[in-house]
Image: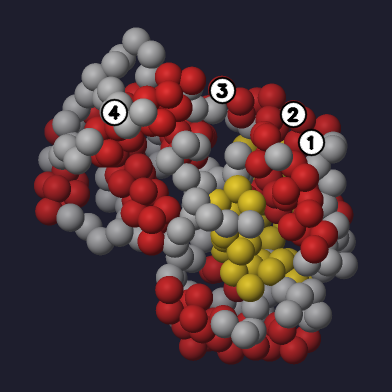
Amino acid sequence: MSGIILRWMGGGAGDTICNLLASNNPNTYMNFKSKGLDDGTGRSMIIMSHDEWYPSLSNLGRKNASPPKEQLKKDLLKLIKNHKKFILRCHYFDHKFDNLLKGRAEVNDIGVDLDFLPFIVQAIIAKIPKSHPMYELKYKLTYRKQSASDQMLQKISRKLSNHQKKQVLIWNLISDAVKRINEFDLGNTAFSTQDLFYNNKRIEDFFKGKGYEINLDVPYLSNWKNINKIYLPSEKYQSCLKNNKYEYTNKKELSIVERYIFLLLSGKRFIFLD
C-alpha cells in the first residue's frame, strides 16, 4: 500500500502539511489543491478538488464530512487500482470508515494531546470569521453526540451576546476534541501537530518512509510558525496540566481556552467564565 489518507481535527495544521506535500510531490494524485499561506491570518489555504471519476473524495476532506460509504468504497477501490500513490485530505473520523479501509489504504492521523490542545482550539477561534455559522451554535458537532446541555445552549443562543456565544463555541470545540482524542488515540500517532514546532525530523521521516518527499526547511513553514506561535500553550497551562491542577478561575495566567479545558477536565458543566 502506498496511498495515504491524512486525517486531522480542524486547527491541527494539516493544511500546512498538505501545502508542503503538494509542492514536493507534483505527480501524486491529491483531492486538494494548494493555495499557499495567508500572511494576514497565518492560515494555510487549500481548495478541495472535485473529480468526476471519484466524486466522494472531495467530500472526504470537508469539515463535518460524511460521504456515502458505498460510494466512498467504490471510489477508493478505483483510485487504488488507477494510482500507485495518492494523498487524500480527510476530516472524516469514523471507526466504520477505518475498518472499511483495512488492507486497502492507510489512515494516518495527525496527533494531538491535551498538552497541545490549546493551540488547536485557539487557532480555530482566531481564524474563523464572526459571521461563521459556528457562532450561531447550530453547527453539527463533528464527532460526539449532542447532549441535553448542547440543545439547551442552542435554544437560548439568540439571547446570548457575541462574547457569550464565543465561550459556548470554545466549550463545544474542546468537548468534541477531547472526546475524539480519547476515542481515536490521537496522543499516540506517528507524528503530531506540535512536531511542526519542535520535531520536524519526525514528520520528514514518516513521509519519506512512505515514499513521499517533504521539505520542512523552507520559508513557507518558517513564516507559518512565526505567525502561529501566538497560539502555543502557555507555560502556566503546561505546568498545571502536568500537576493535575485545573485552575479554570485563573484569569491572570491562563487564556480563556486553557481555562475551559481545565473546566472540562475538572468534571464541571458549562458555565460562563468571563
Binning the other alpha carbons within 10 Å of mark 1 as few (below 14), some (14 to 19) or many (20 upward) gives some
Residue 87 disc label:
none
Relative height, residue 225 to residue 180 (above, below): above
Q: Nearer the viewer, mark 2 or mark 4?
A: 4
At a point 84% along the width and 46% down the height, the residue shown is 215
Residue 220 disc label:
1
Binning the other alpha carbons within 10 Å of mark 2 as few (below 14), some (14 to 19) or many (20 upward) gives some
User: Mark 3 sits on what residue?
Assistant: 230
Q: Gap in Å between the C-alphas at discs 2 and 3?
A: 13 Å
Q: Nearer the viewer, mark 4 or mark 3?
A: 4
User: Mark 2 sits on what residue?
Assistant: 223
Mark 4 belongs to which amino acid?
A: Tyr
Of labels 2 and 3, earlier in sequence is 2
Q: Secondary structure at mark 4?
A: loop
Residue 237 placed where, x, y %?
A: 41, 25
Of labels 4 and 3, earlier in sequence is 3
Binning the other alpha carbons within 10 Å of mark 3 as few (below 14), some (14 to 19) or many (20 upward) gives few
Mark 1 belongs to which amino acid?
A: Tyr
Residue 121 placed where, x, y %?
A: 44, 37
Q: Quadrant of residue 72?
A: bottom right
At a point 78% along the width and 54% down the height, the residue shown is 205
Q: Gap in Å between the C-alphas at discs 4 and 3?
A: 22 Å
Mark 3 belongs to which amino acid?
A: Ile
Q: Are marks 2 and 1 in contact (CB under 8 Å)?
A: yes
Residue 246 disc label:
4
Q: Gap in Å between the C-alphas at discs 2 and 1?
A: 5 Å
Indicate left or right for 68 with 35 as reference.
left
